[in-house]
Image: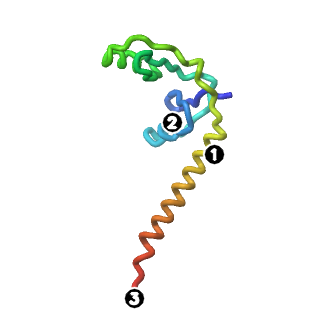
Amino acid sequence: MAKSLICKDCNLLLKSIKEAQDHNEVTGHANFEETTIAIKVVVCEECGKPCRTDAERDMHTRFTGHSKFVDKTDEAGTLDTEKEMKAARAAAMDMDEEEGEEGKKEGGGEEGG
């Protein structure tokens, strides 16, 4: 089963369908695939902040002075992309319905006479 998604346009690893959707909105990239590559996760022992890259960890250390991290990469679960896609589609349909209702309310009160 997949551990992450990868953007085939820029090779960025993403942990969920939501992250892929956000990435698409920002970059326009739309070529995603499931992968068994685990996303690196190290967690600061002092404050609990998760860091996904060495650069993010180093920046956290520089700004906070925290230097002890625990590798939790192996604790990451697998993705159920089918379930996430169903949820994303349902959320998108709900938003479309709400926008349609708003349009009816706004346009419904302007009858000529």
* Of the pair 27 and 14, the residue shown nearer to us: 14
Q: Quadrant of residue 78?
A: top right
Spatial distance from mark 1 to mark 3, Cα to Cα?
A: 46 Å
Spatial distance from mark 3 to mark 2, Cα to Cα?
A: 50 Å
Would residue 75 appear left or right of 53 to someone viewing this image? right
The residue to which callout 2 is attached is 19
- Above/below status of 91 relative to 74: below
Mark 3 packing: few (<14 Cα in 10 Å), some, or many (20+)? few
Q: Quadrant of residue 79?
A: top right
Asked if marks 3 and 2 touch (Cβ < 8 Å), the reply is no
Asked if marks 2 and 1 touch (Cβ < 8 Å), the reply is no
Assign a secondary structure to mark 1. Answer: helix
Percent position (x, y) of residue 104? 48, 70
The residue to which callout 1 is attached is 86
Type of residue at label 3? Gly
Type of residue at label 1? Lys
- Which residue is found at the position 43% from the left and 72% from the top? 107
Say which label, 2 or 1, has the lower sequence index. 2
The residue to which callout 3 is attached is 113
Assign a secondary structure to mark 3. Answer: loop
* Of the pair 90 and 12, the residue shown nearer to us: 90
